[in-house]
């Protein structure tokens, strides 16, 4: 069968892989592996971002005393990650498909060098027919350094690896136009760029995950803006992955329509780098108006009103408009001292060059 999508990132959430008692649902895991294997054998490169390490470890360990949330997460994931990957290894081996483990942390995306090292690792794996299985390294990630959840990680991976599609598998069919528990609510099948969903999205989190629909929607929007199709679907439905690729119009899900404009690889990295920002560049209304128009422009010192924080050249900085709202992120073209000195002046080089600027 001819595939429209040849590289797909698949994120499987905790609520898909976890039973009601918090342990790993091996039956569901096996069904997903069968589907991924079918797509792999049809020529689709799959990158699997899988939760489940904590759930996998929870059934193995009985603690002597009550642990705090970080200790518990580190303990369960240390034991569970080995068990989880071994389970994947055995299931994929039945299909003759090798898999490899990629454990990462938020800090690993903070510098361009680490970012490219990860990209190269997974590129080599895919080129040799190996399916990368990616998860956050919860054993060394502490609260302030953690991803919001694996939705955020999957967005970074899809963007970094130039995937054509990101599929986020949850335990509901997509984004509803009301509460999913409401019998009259229906799934929004397509979401165009710029559509306001604030009245539909509920703030609640998943039972076993760290994120909810707000996180999924925010990540989906950002990734779709980079030209990648994003789908939110129910991972507990039989053959959901195969159906999404082979029968897309007939399969229940929410699809975020991608931007037709291509985004450079460096801008993709910057788009997901807000968490590593070292400072802020505040701009006036004129600069704000130009930046938020369709023109390709850099941030010049003449439009800068305030510099916040200390940063070096090439550090990530937040861009703050005249009303105090963040409108983007960029890579600083100079350090904060030089930015201060040039602020408000004509004829100086850009503080943030257009090629290294992402406007939300």
Image (cartoon, rainbow, N blue to C red):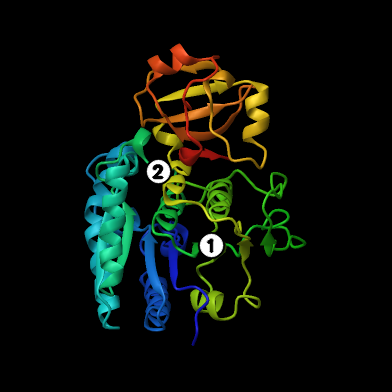
For mark 1, does the 10 Å Cα neighbourhood hold few (<14), some (14 to 19), or many (20 or more) residues? some
The quadrant holding residue 84 is bottom left
Q: Residues within 10 Å of mark 2 (few under 14, many from 20)?
A: many
Most foreground residue, 61 or 189 = 189
Residue 122, image x, y percentages: 29, 61
Percent position of residue 162, x then y:
43, 60
In this view, the residue farthest toward the front is 347
The answer to whether marks 1 and 2 mark residues whose Cβ atoms lie closer than 8 Å is no
Label 2 belongs to which residue?
Answer: 147
Q: Can residue 309 be seen in this view?
A: no
**Residue 300 numbered tag:** none
What is the CA distance from the residue labelled 1 to the residue labelled 2? 20 Å
Drawn side of residue 241 relative to residue 324, left or right:
left
**Quadrant housing the C terminus:** top right
Q: x and y percent of residue 270 in the render?
A: 44, 41
Among the two numbered marks 1 and 2 on one chain, the one whose residue lies closer to the N terminus: 2
Please determine whether, in this image, residue 237 is positioned above or below residue 327: below
Which is in the foreground here, disc 1 or disc 2?
A: 2
Q: Which mark is residue 171?
A: 1
Determine the residue positioned at 23% across, 51% down: 78
Indicate whether 339 appears above or below 251.
above
């Amino acid at each position: 069968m001819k595939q429209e999508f040849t590289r797909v990132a698949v994120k499987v959430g905790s609520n898909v892989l976890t039973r009601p008692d918090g342990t790993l649902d091996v039956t569901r895991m096996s069904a997903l592996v069968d589907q991924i294997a079918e797509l792999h054998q049809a020529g689709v490169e799959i990158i699997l971002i899988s939760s489940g390490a904590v759930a996998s470890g929870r059934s193995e360990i009985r603690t002597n005393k009550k642990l705090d949330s970080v200790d518990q997460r580190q303990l369960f994931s240390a034991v569970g990650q080995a068990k989880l990957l071994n389970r994947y290894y055995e299931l994929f081996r039945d299909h003759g498909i090798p898999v490899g483990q990629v454990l990462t942390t938020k800090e690993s995306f903070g510098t361009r060098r680490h970012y490219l090292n990860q990209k190269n690792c997974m590129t080599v794996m895919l080129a040799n027919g190996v399916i990368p299985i990616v998860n956050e390294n919860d054993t060394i990630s502490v609260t302030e350094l953690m991803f919001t959840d694996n939705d955020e990680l999957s967005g970074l991976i899809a963007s970094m690896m130039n995937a054509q599609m990101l599929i986020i598998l949850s335990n509901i069919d997509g984004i509803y136009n009301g509460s999913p528990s409401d019998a009259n609510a229906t799934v929004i099948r397509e979401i165009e760029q710029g559509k306001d969903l604030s009245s539909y999205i509920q703030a609640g989190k998943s039972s076993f995950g760290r994120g909810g629909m707000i996180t999924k929607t925010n990540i989906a929007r950002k990734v779709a803006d980079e030209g990648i199709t994003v789908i939110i679907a129910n991972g507990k439905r039989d053959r959901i992955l195969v159906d999404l690729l082979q029968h897309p119009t007939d399969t229940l899900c929410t699809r975020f329509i991608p931007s037709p404009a291509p985004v450079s690889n460096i801008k993709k990295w910057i788009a997901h780098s807000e968490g590593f920002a070292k400072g802020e560049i505040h701009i006036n209304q004129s600069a704000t108006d130009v930046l938020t128009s369709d023109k390709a422009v850099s941030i010049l010192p003449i439009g800068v009103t305030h510099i916040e924080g200390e940063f070096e050249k090439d550090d990530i900085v937040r861009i703050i408009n005249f009303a105090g709202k963040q409108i983007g992120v960029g890579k600083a073209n100079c350090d904060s001292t030089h930015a201060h000195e040039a602020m408000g002046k004509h004829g100086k080089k850009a503080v943030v060059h257009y090629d290294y600027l992402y406007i939300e």
